[in-house]
Image (cartoon, coloured by chain):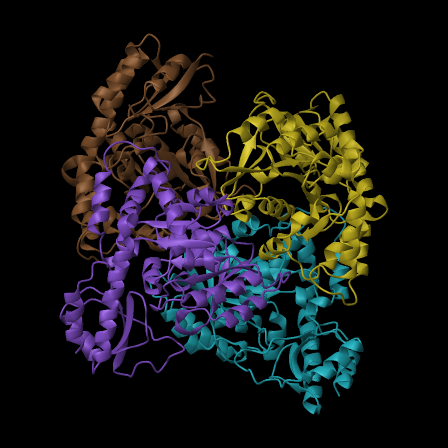
Chain colours: A brown, B purple, C yellow, D cyan
Amino acid sequence: MIFSSDNWAGAHPAVAQRLFDVSGGFASAYGTSDLDQMVYQRFNEIFEREVAVFFVGTGTAANSLALASVARTGGVTFCHHEAHIHTDECGAPGFFAHGSRLHPVSGANAKIDPQALSAAIARFPEGGVHFGQAAAVSITQATEFGTVYSLEEIEAVSAVARETGLPLHMDGARFANALSALGCTPADMTWKRGVDVLSFGGTKNGCWMAEALVIMDPAKARDMPYLRKRSAQLFSKSRFIAAQFDAYLQDGLWMSMAAHANAMAERLRAGLARSNRCRNAWDTQANEVFAVIPKSVMDEAQKAGARFYDWPVPADQPDLAAEDEVLIRLVTSFATHEEEVDGLLRLFG
Amino acid sequence: MIFSSDNWAGAHPAVAQRLFDVSGGFASAYGTSDLDQMVYQRFNEIFEREVAVFFVGTGTAANSLALASVARTGGVTFCHHEAHIHTDECGAPGFFAHGSRLHPVSGANAKIDPQALSAAIARFPEGGVHFGQAAAVSITQATEFGTVYSLEEIEAVSAVARETGLPLHMDGARFANALSALGCTPADMTWKRGVDVLSFGGTKNGCWMAEALVIMDPAKARDMPYLRKRSAQLFSKSRFIAAQFDAYLQDGLWMSMAAHANAMAERLRAGLARSNRCRNAWDTQANEVFAVIPKSVMDEAQKAGARFYDWPVPADQPDLAAEDEVLIRLVTSFATHEEEVDGLLRLFG
Amino acid sequence: MIFSSDNWAGAHPAVAQRLFDVSGGFASAYGTSDLDQMVYQRFNEIFEREVAVFFVGTGTAANSLALASVARTGGVTFCHHEAHIHTDECGAPGFFAHGSRLHPVSGANAKIDPQALSAAIARFPEGGVHFGQAAAVSITQATEFGTVYSLEEIEAVSAVARETGLPLHMDGARFANALSALGCTPADMTWKRGVDVLSFGGTKNGCWMAEALVIMDPAKARDMPYLRKRSAQLFSKSRFIAAQFDAYLQDGLWMSMAAHANAMAERLRAGLARSNRCRNAWDTQANEVFAVIPKSVMDEAQKAGARFYDWPVPADQPDLAAEDEVLIRLVTSFATHEEEVDGLLRLFG
Amino acid sequence: MIFSSDNWAGAHPAVAQRLFDVSGGFASAYGTSDLDQMVYQRFNEIFEREVAVFFVGTGTAANSLALASVARTGGVTFCHHEAHIHTDECGAPGFFAHGSRLHPVSGANAKIDPQALSAAIARFPEGGVHFGQAAAVSITQATEFGTVYSLEEIEAVSAVARETGLPLHMDGARFANALSALGCTPADMTWKRGVDVLSFGGTKNGCWMAEALVIMDPAKARDMPYLRKRSAQLFSKSRFIAAQFDAYLQDGLWMSMAAHANAMAERLRAGLARSNRCRNAWDTQANEVFAVIPKSVMDEAQKAGARFYDWPVPADQPDLAAEDEVLIRLVTSFATHEEEVDGLLRLFG
């Protein structure tokens, strides 16, 4: 009963097998092999346009390089205050982008409120050297709260970015889960809505370590090869990432894994909705569920072998949990079994 | 007949199999799993002392983080002018260490000359703010020229570092090949000779992507967890690196792979010594061979399917090759077959 | 009627004269001249202990170097959300400290609330690599809101810093004004209260360009000469700063200038308290006054030649000004005349 | 008898006086005052085109910001191995430009050899991510060796830069001295020869602290306001720099000071040419003279009160001085008197 994180799972057997299969033989290094090239092409197909793809090692690398690629001196990137880049990356975005800063913006359900974004950007007018300059906007899809921006919501944020001339980045560590929740195409959720740069995550959804930085307009990727190399993210035996993505993207494996993870989360949510002792903290759409449960229940569940993290109550919802209750996060993945979900729900009662 | 680089090989079957075997189930993330812990312990055994081990993604990352961990403001790291960190890492060491610089030092066979090192360090006296301050010394073992520092040679460089209070880093991208050439223990070649920080490479010697930063004195590793995370080198499913090292270090696989690669290089050198048209450019001890061959031979060999790179003639040996000759580099690996070596030698005539 | 900023004033005649007087002759460069040395000694006297003094060019430099000197990888510096380093320095602190971040803390009157500080620091526990690590605390004395920390308030913040092992920085761009308001000694307001590093400002209080970074424990200043030089803040003809400080610190000129500026602010506050149309927005103690005035009055005053800036209403006091009112900031300096104050008050009615 | 450096002199009386004169009254801050604006206009006149001018505090700042403004990721700036930015700025250029590196190029008389430059740039082909990418070329005029590039020599370097698409920076810490030596106009020596960015130094030639970064094409200056502010080089009371430049540039004061310094150097050179014991080390054209003198003479001269620095013998001229001789550097300035020169020459015999 592991609900700690989707990165506690290993690799899907098909991904592991593909990686094993390509281990023999020789191939040119640093992302130039036939397999690498073939997977780049696959990305073009998936996004229905020519895109520039750069394999990197971690989501932090994808996000930080994305933001570095659009950085400006004294630059400010606007993101939700709960964004992973803001809270969980040890300042990597600021390091990669030479001291650029993240400016937190509020909004319900961990999604940026377009009006709040507009107001935040307005505080950094062109020429206001003391404040620094607006550089980019970043959204997380799915969000850290398990919610998913609708296409209209992406469009609304994108419109603000466009009006103010700022590029739009999407942190897609859980891209497939969001896509599955919305039931739209990758193109729909990204460049057709104004997304310029995407962190395309595979690790949390059944790969070992496969992340890609996708720049929608290849003409804007000129410096990225150097950015990636200088940041120590260019892998010599790059085909070991390519192989993972090859299996991941074949026959819709990635979408079926995400659909499964989401379904397991839905099963959790439904069970919580029926519980007398526990409840959903808020509505989620992807593979994360946030629940408020009695502390005593948490203790029992953990004693019984369930693994999950308690979570800080959001500052803007101080009354979410009673004193003897606790907010917890439950994450499902391609590897979550129905039996585990049902077992957990039984413990929650 | 692939002699382009040891990173054109894939992964050894045992490494690939082990990675496949651990792909199922759940494990705690970010380097905390049982498998990770077990491999850290294996490093302690190999180095005959407690060391601090940090898995990272690339040799560039290992080197850059090592140097960043001993960086000082306005700092200068002394390395051979042919060192990989100096010529081939797109400035990563300077980026990771906030603008610190590399100061090239000369020496025969791509090894630092201790006297030249001493003289170079003397140009950065304490308090000389205009020049910056001496920060570290870095050696490459085996070197970029396929040569290997003897234990006495390491000791001589180390003595200079010690006298001037500078930490000593070893770039061990081809650590196993050097170790095999010297026939000594890891401890002998590192901390017993004064090496403080080691980039321990597994990728070039049969892994997919397995590099470790080894800090000999764990007390000096306090900031490394943050350095690694901020540099986007902390992998969530860290066990995929642990699994590779687990197989790599089991039953001496790593040393037998290195011994094989070295033996194939020796076979090449011996063949070249017998050639009428080609010759060894200089003597090497590890898995790289440098040869001077007629351009016409290079063309024929490449037409016949041989793969290798031509190489710039070292500035201090301008007469190495005649006008119709070319310097080439030949790299062997765990995956190199005798037949390939013999085939290449036949082409060289 | 210039109340835009204390940096719109020029230099006090005594400062200008002293600078003129030392312009002839030769002196050793880079802070080593007799005059430089004499002024360093003067700082020792003023602070009643041996301190390490580094002249720099701007307040931004002093603050950024101070924070860089105590930076840690992935480091987080805690400051009030209205702090100058947070809002007005174009990200310089993050740049100088290699991507370190500022973490805003709340508190009334632009002063850090010790409990809020304690809670904020607690979110960065040792070993929490995803969040980064707590590195320093910074307070502004006098604050951006014209208020002044009492000695007890400094002590309270300092106690939190001490308990958590964090160094305490004081941004003293208006150090003299705060000192004058409190009527205590420099030692009382700094190291006796736990301040470790001080940005000692002279520019806003009658110098041309004279800022000093004061490290209370000289043993902790080892890297600062390199930090300063690498940041391009080491001035060759350093005596031109020394000369300014020499005049500034002679016969209490600095304190009498600050006392005058504060008195002019007090005269403004008293006048505003008597006004029917305008009012003090909040109580201030140093040389800044914040007032709420009708927009029509602002327009008239500006037409009549008064110069001052309107100011954003603090987020936590949204009802401070009515719709037809505006918040303005009025800054006095050594060069402000009573007649100007009275003239402005007449315009305010 | 001070020949240590031109930065041991103070400020010219006219500069000091002008600074005194503007000390009263109020003026808008951060480079927006009428006086600032007027001086910007003066630069346009001097350069016979509209240029973008940014006052900064030190030559290191001007150089580092210039190079940062044209930096590229993994960037390499080509400069002579004796360039100030390479040897004397504590790594500031690398820090300001985020880890960009300086690549030393050789050439006689401390001037870049165009062929060597061309060869050096060729080692960094577009797309060679391991090596990094060529970013800029920097020359020093006058050089660190007291020599001056002729217009043809600048043109020759510039041609290489232009062909390879690299911007050309000129470190003009001794710009006026070079200009005086060549007898040409500022336009002739800069943008008419392909110089894109200039560090225009005033400090060494009679100012207290007045340096300007001049970007020849204002359209390329878009980010500089932020670069300068983020680097803590935007001065609030900017008019104190403007005032210095105002006097400096008035009635040709700057050129007459430079001419005087050069004449004093010429007097030194002529005297040395007549000496039996001492000799000019090489021919210089600006205000620095390098001499080879017996150690015993150096000791006597210093005992008699002469101040100058001994200098490392250039690596490519190892036989410059005999064992009992020493290489010394003698720098003249606007403040050097004929009597001092003659006094020194008498000591040299």
| Whole-percent x, y for residue A147 in the image | 33, 25
Residue B97 located left or right of residue A204:
right
Q: Is residue D332 left or right of residue A66?
A: right
Q: Which quadrant is the N terminus of chain B positioned in?
A: bottom left
Relative depth, front residue between C139 and B200: B200
Residue C99 x %, y %: 50, 45
Residue A151, quarter of picture: top left
Question: Which of B332 and A342 lies nearest the eye of the viewer?
Answer: B332
Q: Residue at x 77, y 67 (%)?
A: C26
Residue name at image x 31 percent, y 44 percent: B241
Quarter of the picture holding the C terminus of chain B: bottom left
Q: Is residue C147 visible?
A: no
Q: Position of residue B204 (x, y in %)?
A: 29, 56
Any part of residue D32 in sight:
yes
Q: Is residue A311 left or right of residue A8?
A: right
Q: Residue at x 62, y 86 (%)?
A: D322
Observer-nearest residue: C198 or C183? C198
- In this view, the residue in front, C173 or C64, is C64
Instruction: Give above or below for B252 relative to A289.
Output: below
- Number of marks: 0
Outermost right residue: C251
Residue drawn at (64%, 33%), measured in percent from left and top? C162
In the image, taking residue D242 as reference, residue A110 lies left or right, namely left
* Rendering coords of residue D178 (x, y %): 60, 75
